[in-house]
Image (cartoon, helix red, strand yellow):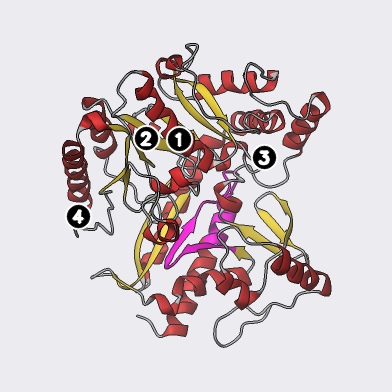
Amino acid sequence: MTKPEDGKLEIEYSERTQAMQRDALQYILFSLGNYGDIQSSGVKIIERGEGCYIYDADGRKYLDTFASLLTTICGHHRPEVHQAMLEQMRRIEFYPIYHDCLTPVVIELAKRLADLAPGDLEVSFFVSDGSDATESAIKMARQYFWEQGEKARRKILYRRNSYHGASFGAMSATGLSWFREPQEPLTPGFVQVMAPHPYRCELGADPEESARLALRNTEAIINWEGPHTIAAMILDPVPGSNVGYPVPPPFYLPELKALCQEHGILTIYDEIQVGMGKTGKMFCCEHWDVVPDFLCLAKAFAAGFAPMGVVLTTAEIADVFRRPGHEFRHGYTFAGHPICAAAVLAVLDIFEREHLVERAAKMGAYLGERLKALWQYPIVGDIRGLGLLRAVELVADPESRAPLDPAMNVGGFVRDYCYRHGMILRNNGDILVLAPPLVVTRELIDEIVANIEGGIVAAIEHFGLG
C-alpha cells in the first residue's frame, strides 16, 4: 500500500483479488455498503482470521479493533467452537423449533441462559439475528397485552438516535432519520422520546440535566399518549456505535424503569451491541442493577461463529403464551438452529474458562486510561464509553463542540491511516469507535491507541487543523 497525496487508500491488489473484486461488484449488493469507500479503495476481501487479527486475500495482516462487527469477541479461529459445531452436525444438522419439537442442545442452551441471565429472566425465544430479536420482543409485548384483554396497548416508545435493526418493526423503533427515510411511512404505533446524551444533548444541557430532561420528556409523552395505549419501551442501556456509546448518569435507567413500571409499560433492553461481556459485565444492564421484561441478544451471542440471537423474558410473561389457543403467533424457520446452539454453548464455556467478563473489565479500564493521551490534540472533543466499548469524537473546536465539516471526512482519513498501518478501525462520521475482542491484550491496546494517535496527528497536518 502507498500513501497518495489526497489521503485516500491506494492498494496494490493481486490479479486473483482483482478478479474477486470484479465478481463482487457484479454479483453482490452489499449489506449497508459504502460505495464511496469501494470506489476509493476497492472491495476488501477478508480471507481468514486468527485471534485478534484478520488477513486479506493477498495475505496482509490487520488488527481487528471492532471484533468484525461487535461479534467475534472470543477472537477468530477457535478450534473448540469448531469441534462443538462439527459434533452437533454429526448428530443432526437441523430440525426446527416448530409446533412441538426441540433438539437436546437447544434445551441445554436455554437452561444455561436461565442460570446466567439477570433477575427473573429465564425463558428463551430463539432467533437468527438482532433485527429478529428486537422485532420478536416488540411483537411479544404487544400480544401479551392483547391476550390479557388490554387490546389498546399497542404503542412502542423508542428513543431518538437509537438503532434497533433493519426489519420494518425494528426500523420503526430506530431513531436515526437517515436510516428510516427511504422506507417511510413505517409501521404505525411507534412513538419517539428524548434520549440523554452526556456530550451532545439535543437541548444543550450538561450530562445530568440531559438525563433529567429525557426522563421528564418520556413521562410527558406517556401522559400525552395515554399509558393505557403503550405496550413497551425499547432502549439500549448504553447506545451503540452509531452515536459512540454515550453512558447515561447512574440514576437514569433505574428511574426510567420505575416510570415504566408505574404505568404498566413493559421494558425491552436491546443489548445486541453492548451485551455479552463487552462493558465488563455479562449484561450491560447489570451496571445499574435494572432488569427488563425482555432482553435481546445477538451479534456476539454466538461470537461470530454462527447466526443466532435470543429474547430472554420472564416465566410470568411466557406463561401467557403457554395457554392453548393463546400461543405467540410468530417464529422463524431457522430459530434455535442446533449447530448455532452448539456454538453458543462452546462460547459460554470459553467465557467461564478464560474469565472473559473479568478480563474485559480490566482491559476496558486500561483502554480507557490509554485513550486519555488523545486529549492533548485540538480536534479531540470527547472520549467516552464503558469497558471495551470506547469512542473518540473528533470536532472542529473542543470548547464549543462545533463539529468538523462532514465533507472533509476527517474520521475517514484517520480510519484509512490505520488501515495503511495494519489496523481495522470503525468510524461513524467523525466518531471513531472501538470494540475489540475480549481476548485483547495490553500490548494490542497500546498498538490500537498508537495507531489512532498517529492517524489524528496525520489528520491535523493534512487538513491544517488546530
**From mark 1 to mark 2, how far is it between C-alphas?**
7 Å
Q: Which residues are magenta?
A: 424-448
Most extreme residue toward the top is 324
Q: Residues within 10 Å of mark 4 (few under 14, many from 20)?
A: some
Question: Dot 1, how many residues are within 10 Å of its Cα: few (below 14), some (14-19), or many (20+)?
Answer: many
Q: Nearer the viewer, mark 3 or mark 2?
A: 3
Check contact, mark 1 vs mark 2: CB within 8 A. yes
Residue 459 percent coordinates (x, y):
46, 78
Residue 318 x/y as whole percent = 45, 18
Contact (Cβ within 8 Å) of mark 4 with mark 1 = no
Does the segment drawn in magenta span residue 320?
no
Q: Residue at x 80, y 28 (%)?
A: 87
Q: Residue at x 35, y 75 (%)?
A: 404
On-image quarter of the C terminus: bottom left
Give the side of residue 306 with respect to residue 409, left or right.
right
Separation of residues labelled 3 and 2 (CA atoms): 28 Å
Please tell me which residue lies in front, 428 or 438: 428
Kindly identify which residue carries mark 3. Answer: 306
Q: Secondary structure at mark 1?
A: loop
Q: Amino acid at mark 2?
A: His
Q: Residue under circle 2?
A: 287
Rounded to the nearest whole Å, what is the CA distance between mark 2 and mark 4? Answer: 22 Å
What is the quadrant of residue 218 in the picture?
Answer: top left
Q: Residue extending furthest bottom?
A: 5
3 or 1: tag closer to the N-terminus: 1
